[in-house]
Image: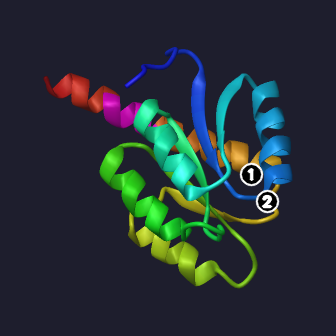
């Protein structure tokens, strides 16, 4: 697996809405965040096989695969990678299921960009703290 530049945050964005993915990835890039776009669950899984990511943002409702199934696979492939689920109206129950399966948190679509950034920062801070704890245990 390819290792990422340590100072840059690397996010895997998995959503089948091309316009949403394009706009969000541009806004994240302006914040100095590297984004790998995947327009399907299958594409997201393939991307995770090739590269490590600091975090994934994953849509619950996609054409090819259910977001919860993708989440289960992500958690097997990269157990320490935080996943933020995106869900539309009426899918709060599915988002709660995602939390039970190990997602870091969820946001309702459309979400405020600053709210997403806040969750990304919080999730990656938690991941860094856990990694520091592991290094101190050695």
Q: Secondary structure at mark 2?
A: loop
The secondary structure that most of the magenta stretch takes on is: helix
Q: Which residues are magenta?
A: 126-131
**The C terminus is located in which quarter?**
top left
Q: Residue at (23%, 30%) from the top-left corner?
A: 134
Percent coordinates x, y for residue 90 in the rendering: 71, 85
Circle 2 packing at 10 Å, graded few (<14), some (14-19), many (20+), is few
Residue underneath mark 2: 111
Q: Does residue 112 appear to the left or right of 72 in the view shown?
A: right
Q: Residue at (82%, 42%) from the top-left corner?
A: 22
Q: Residue at (51%, 39%) from the top-left corner?
A: 47
**The N terminus is located in which quarter?**
top left
Query: Nearest the camera: 7 or 42?
Result: 42
Residue 127 shown in magenta = yes
Circle 1 packing at 10 Å, graded few (<14), some (14-19), many (20+), is few
Q: Does residue 108 appear to the left or right of 50 in the view shown?
A: right
- Quadrant for residue 78, please give it: top left
Identify the disc placed on residue 78: none
Give the mark toward the camera: 1 or 2.
2
Number of numbered markers: 2
Percent coordinates x, y for residue 74 in the rendering: 41, 52
Residue underneath mark 1: 115
Res. 79 visible in picture: no
Res. 12 visible in picture: yes
> Is there a contact, CB below 8 Å, between mark 1 and mark 2?
yes
């Amino acid at each position: 697996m390819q290792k990422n530049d340590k100072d840059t945050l690397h996010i895997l964005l998995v959503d089948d809405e091309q316009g949403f993915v394009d706009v969000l990835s541009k806004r994240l890039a302006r914040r100095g965040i590297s984004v790998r776009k995947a327009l399907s669950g299958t594409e997201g899984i393939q991307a995770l096989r090739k590269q490590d990511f600091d975090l994934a943002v994953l849509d619950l409702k996609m054409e090819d695969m259910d977001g919860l199934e993708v989440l289960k696979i992500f958690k097997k492939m990269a157990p320490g990678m935080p996943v933020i689920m995106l869900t539309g109206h009426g899918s709060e129950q599915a988002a709660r299921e995602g939390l039970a399966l190990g997602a870091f948190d969820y946001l309702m679509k459309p979400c405020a960009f600053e709210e997403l950034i806040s969750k990304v920062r919080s999730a990656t801070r938690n991941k860094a703290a856990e990694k520091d704890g592991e290094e101190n245990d050695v």
